[in-house]
Image: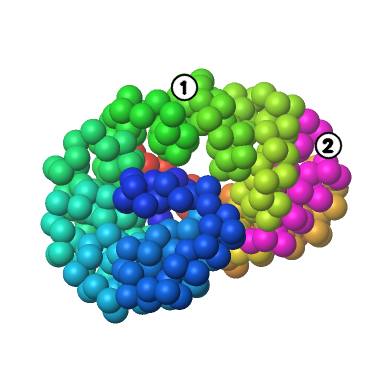
Amino acid sequence: MSQDIGLPWRDDDLTTALETQQQDAASLEALDQRLAQNPADVASWRRRGSILVALNRYDEALETFSHALSLDAEDAWTWANYADMLEKLQRADQALEAYRRATTLRPRFAVAWEHLSVAFRRRERYREALAAADRALALEPTSAYAWNARGAALLDLHRRAEAFKAWKRAVVLDPDFAIAWFNLGEAYRGRRRNRKALSAYHRALTLDPHYARAWLGQAEALSARRHFDEAIVSFDQALQLEGKLARAWHGKGSALQKRGRYDAALEAFARARASDAQNPEVWNSQGAVLLRLHRDQEALDSYERAAELAPDNGDAWAGQYRALIRLGHDAEAYEAAKRATRLNIAEALHRNRH
């Protein structure tokens, strides 16, 4: 996918039965006693599934919704919740089929169309994701969730201006929608409007202080504005919430490098590689720090690894040139310089065409 976009499930709007999200195991036990006396009570099976969802017991919830469908296979709400459980358990094809069943049984079921849009996007079926989001909006034009889903699909289709407008619409409709504020922040940052991005991330974090990706977005926007000390604090907040977030470790390392804290930067890059060893930019960043420390052979090794992962990465070849010159390998340095120049010119031409 083209960007790390937030897409929530709107579980609380599926039905009033999901008011049971605060139910605990005692409520479940009481409901099981009722079902023992009347095992054909479909409504109780549906309610049991909702409680299990609230308790994050998804396998049991899936089994419960499946049993409810065996008693009444014509209930769109149950199909939608059954699909949600399949989606959470990464049973992709079955989930899509269940969502389709829900929308076939109840074509005006806006939330099911929203969820179907999210499911399509996760499978990189972006045109279908957009069509499903638009179907949801035709039924419920004031749904911030549907506008958010529409924005994500539009971004994946490279229709960035329309995606930006969709997320602005989402936060107008629901000013307390943290995920839409995060997405709007990402859109602002994509336009290099980092001050606006910071305002959006701040709003998301005010609504949800445990939102790791919003801390990460804020950190990257602060780095872009060269507020490196504040950025490091935000990277650390993201990493406290998601310790294996490779992008956060990479960003923190780059900020530490800018502050001249090279050993700490190398530690951060090592943590980034532990989570994502296939990212050439981490190897490039590590190479740059190693050059600063005059560890030229190690720097060359890093840049060579970056070039192995991404042969068309101009920075990797430019880094090799600098390391090779220092190591006295002039002929190889010349070849690396030619490769870097050719790739960087091609990249510049590509940017100008787009």
Label 2's element?
A: loop
Query: Which quadrant is home to the C terminus?
Result: top left
Q: Nearer the viewer, mark 2 or mark 1?
A: 1
Give neighbour class at mark 1: few <14, some 14-19, many 20+ (Cα, 10 Å).
some
**Front-lying residue, 304 or 193:** 193
Q: Give yes or no for residue 253 being in the magenta stretch.
A: yes
| CB-based contact (under 8 Å), mark 2 and mark 1 | no
Q: Which residue is at a point 81% across and 50% down the rendered structure image?
A: 267
Label 2 sits on residue? 261
Label 1 sits on residue? 196
Q: Is residue 6 visible?
A: yes
Name the spot of residue 249 as percent of width and height, x first. 69, 48
Q: Amino acid at mark 1?
A: Lys
The quarter of the picture where residue 187 lies is: top left
Q: Is residue 340 visible?
A: no
Q: Which segment did they paint magenta?
A: 249-276
Q: Is residue 83 left or right of residue 101?
A: right
The quarter of the picture where residue 91 lies is: bottom left
Name the spot of residue 110 as percent of width and height, x first. 22, 49
Q: Which residue is at a point 83% across and 43% down the rendered structure image?
A: 264
Label 1's element?
A: helix
The quarter of the picture where residue 141 lies is: top left
Q: CA separation, marks 2 and 1? A: 29 Å
